[in-house]
Image: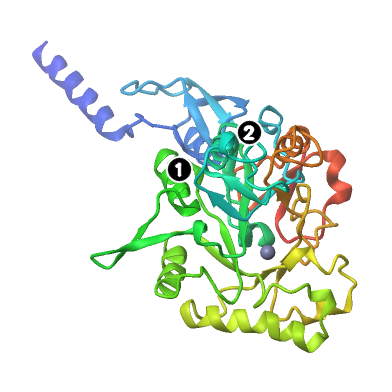
Amino acid sequence: MKTKLFVAFLLILLVRILTPDLMIDLQNKKLEDAVMLSKKYSFKLDINYIYSDQEEDIVINQSLKKGNKLNKNSLVKIDVSKGIDYKKYNVNEMGNVPIMMYHGIVNILDNETVTKTGNVDKDGYHRTKESFIRDLEFFYQNGYRMIKLNDYVDGKIKTPLGKSPIVLTFDDGLVNNINILGEENGDLIIDPNSAIGILESFKKKYPDYNVTATFFLNGSLFRQLNYNDKILKWLIKNGYDIGNHTYSHLALDTLDIELVKEEVTRVYDILNDSIPNKYVNIVSLPFGRPYNVEHPNFNGIINTKAALRVGWSSEVSPFNISFNPMYIKRIRAYDNNGKDFDIKQNFDLLENSRYISDGNIEKIVIKKEDMKYLKNTNINVFAY
Ligand SMILES: [Zn+2]
């Protein structure tokens, strides 16, 4: 009797040693690997495909609990990702992108202005600090996340899934864009009421806002002789960008072509001294002129990959066949009771037409009906 028991014990031990360990974890494995394992260890898979924010064909749920052992022919239920439910997020990478045009940010309240709105001046080129903060809060709460103008032009929109890109620009290099109060241990002390001071506070408040902006400068840069060079370096180091607004802010369509070239080249050369390697290559046209891209003076905007107008509305997706980087429209950041293309009107219009990201820079996701607007591209396209 004892011998029989002993033999049985030995047999069990032998089986145990010869049987492979079947405590298999399929979670986060690729479907093809899960199938391979099921064949190798002869268990059955019951596959259920569901939408998820995970990559396609990844096992996202399994009926197998930790510690459960598999026997031959056991059935394991798995949920496999069929990718993102683009419809749910209304992904639309053929949608429009707002490129905001600001000039000065003035440290006063709305009710201290002549207009009693966020406009400091009648035409709304300068904005109160109060309204600028309101704008930034509004953009964030409405699902907009900032991107670099450069990345928009290059079609490298890194906005997370379900969010919309927005670009901020500032023209004329006004002191109130970044007002330097002094230096402390080699660091610039930035006026918290200047545009950069306010943007930096939003960077802290909403780390996922991706705070950035492009400052378009004339020959006087930021009009702070002792700090201009340091400001330029600080801005680049801290995620902001610089653009060229020409040397003396003349209407380019009124100049002869040689003068146009000089107006543009001089600023590029000055900027190249502080931030080298031709880092800057975008121009914002003074007064938005020439008004027509066919104008011969466009040939004078040399070494330039994009040019900005003084616009009135949002711009098309960079993947749109009609996208012209040399003639980009901007939204004037001003208030006018929802009329004449002010901020409110533009963002109301964008509700039905805005760019909504798939969160994947290597894929363009658009609606089927928009296929006809798609330009030639090397990027993978998915239409739904
Ligand atoms: Zn200007």
Circle 2 is placed at which residue position? 82
Q: Is any part of residue 253 visible from this angle?
A: yes
User: At which x and y percent is residue 191?
Assistant: 40, 54
Identify which residue is drawn at 50% across, 49% down: 211
Q: Amino acid at mark 1?
A: Phe
User: At which x and y percent is residue 18?
Assistant: 29, 34
Q: Please state the quadrant of the image where ligand 1 appears.
A: bottom right
Q: Between residue 12 and residue 146, name the one nearer to us.
A: 146
- Residue 287 vertical position relative to residue 85 in the rendered view, above or below: below
Tell me which corner region of the image, top left, top right, bottom left or bottom right, holds residue 145: top right
How has the structure been colored for display? rainbow
Circle 1 is placed at which residue position? 202
Q: Is any part of residue 57 visible from this angle?
A: no
Q: Between residue 162 and residue 193, name the one nearer to us.
A: 193
Instruction: Give left or right: position of 275 versus 152.
Output: left
User: At which x and y percent is residue 6?
Assistant: 13, 19
Q: Neighbour class for label 2 at 10 Å: few (<14), some, many (≥20)?
A: some
Q: Between residue 73 and residue 194, name the one nearer to us.
A: 194
Numbered disc 1: secondary structure: helix
Identify which residue is drawn at 20% across, 19% down: 8
User: At which x and y percent is residue 241?
Assistant: 54, 63
Q: Amino acid at mark 2?
A: Lys
Label 1 or label 2, whichever comes before in sequence order = 2
Looking at the rendered image, the disc whose residue lies closer to the viewer, 1 or 2, is 1
- Residue 16 vertical position relative to residue 374 in the rendered view, above or below: above
Quadrant of the snapshot with the N terminus = top left
Q: Residue furthest left?
A: 2
